[in-house]
Amino acid sequence: MSQHQEKARIIRFEQLSEHNVRLTLESPLIVETAEPGQFVMIRAGGSQDPLLRRPFSLHQSSSNGQIQIYFKNVGRGTDILARCKVDETLDVFGPLGRGFQVDKDKPACLVGGGLGIAPMLFLAKKISSLGKNHSRDLIILGGRTRGDVEPLVEDFKQFGLALHCATDDGSYGIKGFVTEILQSEQLAANTQVYGCGPDNMLEVMHRFCSERQIDCQVSVESVMACGMGACLGCNIEAANKDYVHVCIDGPVFNSEDLAWNS
C-alpha cells in the first residue's frame, strides 16, 4: 500500500470541548488509499522539538481530498497541534498500518471508548455506504465525561445506525462503561464487532466475544516512534507467544490473535 508525505494545510480547526480538538487537513494523496483503522504520523511544530512524529487515527477521509484527526491536548506534541491555526501546514505521513476488515454481509457493532472514538467515525461512514440493511448495526460510544462524547454524537447520527452512549460520571448517556452496553445487547451470532479504546476495555470486549463465538477486531493504542516497524517500540505479545508490531501488523488485529493480561 502506498504511503505519502504531504504538507497538509489546515482548513478547519474545531475546539470540541475543553481539551478535545479536531483538525481538518487538505491531504489529497493520503486520501487516495486511506481505510478506516489506519493512521498517520504528524510532525508537531516546525523544529526538532518535539523530535518524533505523533500517531493519529484517521477520524475521517473524504472524496474531496480531506482527512480529519481528533485528539486530546495531553502533552507537548498535542499542545502544539492544539495551538495551530487555519492555513498553517503540517508535515503528515501516511496512511499507515492495517485497518479494519469490513464484512458487508454481517451486522456491525462499533465500540469506541475515549480517544478510541476517533477511528469509529470513518468506519461508520464506510459501513453505512455498503447499501445493506442496517437495522441490526449498532454504535456504542463512551468517555469519562460529556465533553468526550456529546460533541461527536451528531456526526455519528448522520449515518442512521443505532447509537448508545455512556460516560464514567453519568453526565451523558448511561453512567458506566461501553462494555456494559455491549454485554446488555442481544447480538446476532454472525455479528462483527469492531473496537478501539484502552487495553482493559478491549480485553473485556475480547472475552465477551470469545465466549459467544462472535468475531471481534480491535484497534490497539500504542506509543510509536516511526510508524513503519523500524524502531521496535510498539511490540506487543501475540496469542502464539510471538511479538507483533502495532504499526505494521496492526493497529487493527483479530482479538483472538493477541495475548491478554488475564
Image (cartoon, helix red, strand yellow):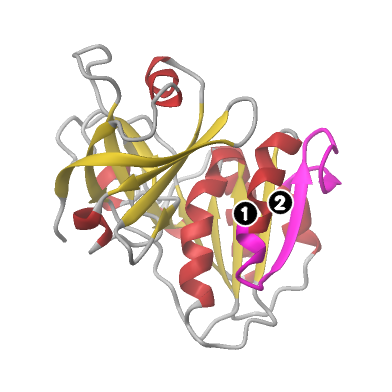
The local secondary structure at tag 1 comes to helix
Task: Tell me whether circle 1 and circle 2 mark residues in contact (CB < 8 Å).
Answer: yes
Q: Tell me the residue at 71%/51% (across/down).
A: 179
Reply yes or no: does residue 166 show up in magenta.
yes
Q: Nearer the viewer, residue 64 or 98?
A: 64
- Residue position for label 1: 205
Q: Nearer the viewer, residue 5 or 106?
A: 5
- In the rendered view, would you say 143 is above or below 155? above
| Residue 244 in sight here | no
**Mark 1 vs 2, N-terminal side:** 2
Residue 251 in the image, given as x and y percentages of width and height: 36, 49
Residue 62 horizontal/vertical position (percent) = 37, 62
Quadrant that contains the C terminus: top right
Q: Residue furthest top?
A: 49
The residue at the point 77 percent across, 56 percent down is 181
Residue 179's label in the rendered image is 2
Specify the segment rendered in magenta: 155-177
Q: Amino acid at mark 1?
A: Met
Q: Nearer the viewer, residue 32 or 141?
A: 32
Q: Is residue 149 magenta?
A: no
**Residue in the image at 59% along x and 26% along y:** 19
**Residue 234 coordinates in the image, percent (x, y):** 31, 34
Q: Residues within 10 Å of mark 1 (few under 14, many from 20)?
A: many
> What x and y, as percent, mark residue 20?
57, 32
The quarter of the displayed image where residue 233 is located: top left
